[in-house]
Amino acid sequence: RRNEQGKIIGVVGIGQDITGRIAQEREYSKLIDTANAPIFGVDTEGKVNVWNQCAMRLVGYSTEEVMGHSLVQEFITDDFKTAVQAVLDQALRGDETANFEFPLITKAGARIEVLLNATTRRDEHGNVIGVVGIGQ
């Protein structure tokens, strides 16, 4: 804030109470983490940023082992990397996919088939921030 001569005389700030939004986000995170379906998320670069408990049990990798790693390059079988990347790319453009079947590689090296719904994730301004996948 400045006076008539242009000298700085103070600061004006505007705040907003976001307590409710934070509580809602925590509840949402808890719901995802404890769901009975494998749920994973990737950012716009395809790096894992959501990995729930069911995905962990199904695939055998802990959250710490997958976070920040490329889903397609590290956890998808070679014969499906192109197709899975295409599904993720479509979701990043807002074109969501339902009932896409693909194999994941478990930590033990086994191949398991997953039926996936890929949904675009957006921030509070509507900008695409990644993809969330819910499997069965």
Image (cartoon, rainbow, N blue to C red):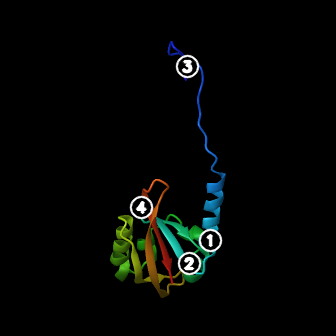
Q: Type of residue at label 3?
A: Ile
Q: Distance between the residues labelled 2 and 1?
A: 14 Å
**Where in the figure is residue 5, as x and y percent of width and height?**
50, 12
> What residue is shown with label 2?
55
Marks 1 and 3: CB-CB under 8 Å?
Answer: no
Name which residue type carries label 2: Ala
Disc nearest the viewer among 3 and 4: 3
Of label 1 and label 4, which has the lower sequence position? Answer: 1
The relative height of residue 85 versus residue 105 in the rendered view (above or below) is above
User: Tag 1's secondary structure?
Assistant: helix
* Residue bearing mark 3: 8
Residue at the image point whose x is 33% and y is 76% from the top: 82
Task: Residue type at mark 4: give it.
Answer: Thr
Name the amino acid, label 1.
Leu
For label 1, the residue is 31
Q: In which quarter of the image is the N terminus?
A: top right
